[in-house]
Image: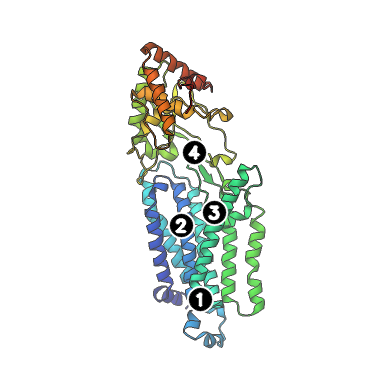
Amino acid sequence: MTGRILRIELRRSAALGVALLSLVTGTALALTSTEFYAGRWMQLAITVRLLLMVLLPLALAGGAWLGRRDARHRVDELFASTVRPRWQRVGPVAGALAVTVVTAYILVFLIAAGWALRTSGYFPANAIVVTAVGVPALVAAAWLGMAAGRAVPRLVTAPIVAVLGFVLVGLVPEIFMMAGVGAALAASRPEPSAVLLVPIFSGGVHDFQTVTNRVSLLQMVWLVSLAATGLLLLGAVRRRAIALAVLPALLGAAVTVPLLPVGGTRGAVAADPVAVELVCDDDGPQVCVTRAHAGLLPDVVGPAREALAVLAAKLPNAPVRAVETRQIDYWAQLTPDPAPPRHTGDTLIFETPTINRSGGADLSDGDFLPSLFQAAWQQECGEQSGQEDEPLARMVAAAWLSDQPPTLESWWDRAEAERGQRAYQALVSLPQAEQRQRMAAAREATLDCRTDALLALLPEDKP
């Protein structure tokens, strides 16, 4: 009997409309941002979780709309007079809404998975766990929305709970993230662990990182307890039952918050050793990328070998292989990950190129080859890195390799760019043997974390 009612609700209630709206909205958002996850399963999981910022308010609003159905048709007093318990009457409706919003969520993931599957060379199993956290989150939102619609059966209830839901899952994590960044920079306390009760990773996760299963499972425990509270509130009639319905959510928070790591997103992630394993092309000078970016290898092989050939023609002891950096970006470095390996003389370590919407390398702007030339004069030196004139000196050194004057970048100060032009002209005016000697000395010094020889290329007069 209950199954028959559930099927009727699935066909005739507003649950199907809520699911279709969620499916269309989620798919549109996912397909307009494929460059954020193409070829990378963990990034797909994080992106789908980020879509909850929109899908959760829709589930809340849809639940509120369904929750006021009895009052809208003026049959709530009639149903209340029957001997059948309320939870038996609302169960099929709640089940239909839960099934439809979860189905829409899974379909959004499967549709977007086509872009991850095309060029992916690495499938981390816990990407499924990260994605699965969205299931109890949507069920909890749907049932809490129904409870709100039943408690306040007004036309404005649905849009109000949608706005409140967006504020809670969208703006609050952003506020905490900005506060956490400021706290980290000030060496103060990190974000509280309670931030992870919101299932949105607004701070993002690096391609070389993974969300720990412990955090995902704790989030599931909290969201399941929240869904239980929503269902109990929906079926409660008396005040005592309403008060007791809040207990699962309180108990879930009491259990999970002490076990969740502090630091928000940065506390929830860990380095993924498999993602940084190298995948190489050995049909010529070796070119390697990380397993997480295996889809980039066919695109970067050509420019990397071209750069290696130029370096071999112009420098003694030039690098003979090119390898993608395994360094995590600055913000992710706030987590205690191992320091990246330093460059060696026989290896050219290059930055990850921009990833396009199909999961390949976006080389359309022509900046990748110059960046390879600049990488020949770069070293990870910890606190010794980052002198003011280093970027300008590297630009001059890269221009010498390409036999082209330095390009005036949009972010360069005009006077600084002119200084770079003068440095280049002074360098190329020297005899060829002296040019090679100076540049070889500059590279050797750079590999030893000494920038004096590289900075000596620049004229002393600053603008």
Which of 99 and 169 lies nearest the eye of the viewer? 169
Q: CA distance from mark 1 to mark 4?
A: 47 Å
Proximity of marks 3 and 2: CB atoms separated by less than 8 Å: no
Locate residue 280, reporting x and y percent. Answer: 40, 31
Q: Label 3, on which residue?
A: 174
Callout 1: helix, strand or loop? helix
Sequence-wise first label, 2 or 4: 2
> Distance between the Cα atoms at labels 3 and 4?
30 Å
Q: Alpha carbon of mark 1 to alpha carbon of mark 3: how far?
A: 30 Å
- Which kind of residue does numbered mark 4 sit on? Val
Q: Is residue 287 visible?
A: no
Examine the rendered structure and indicate whether residue 314 appears above or below residue 215. Answer: above
Identity, as a three-letter code, of the amino acid under mark 2: Leu
Q: Residues within 10 Å of mark 1 (few under 14, many from 20)?
A: many
Mark-to-mark CA distance, 2 and 4: 27 Å
- The kind of secondary structure element at disc 3 is helix
Q: Quadrant of residue 369?
A: top left
Foreground disc of the pair 2, 4: 2
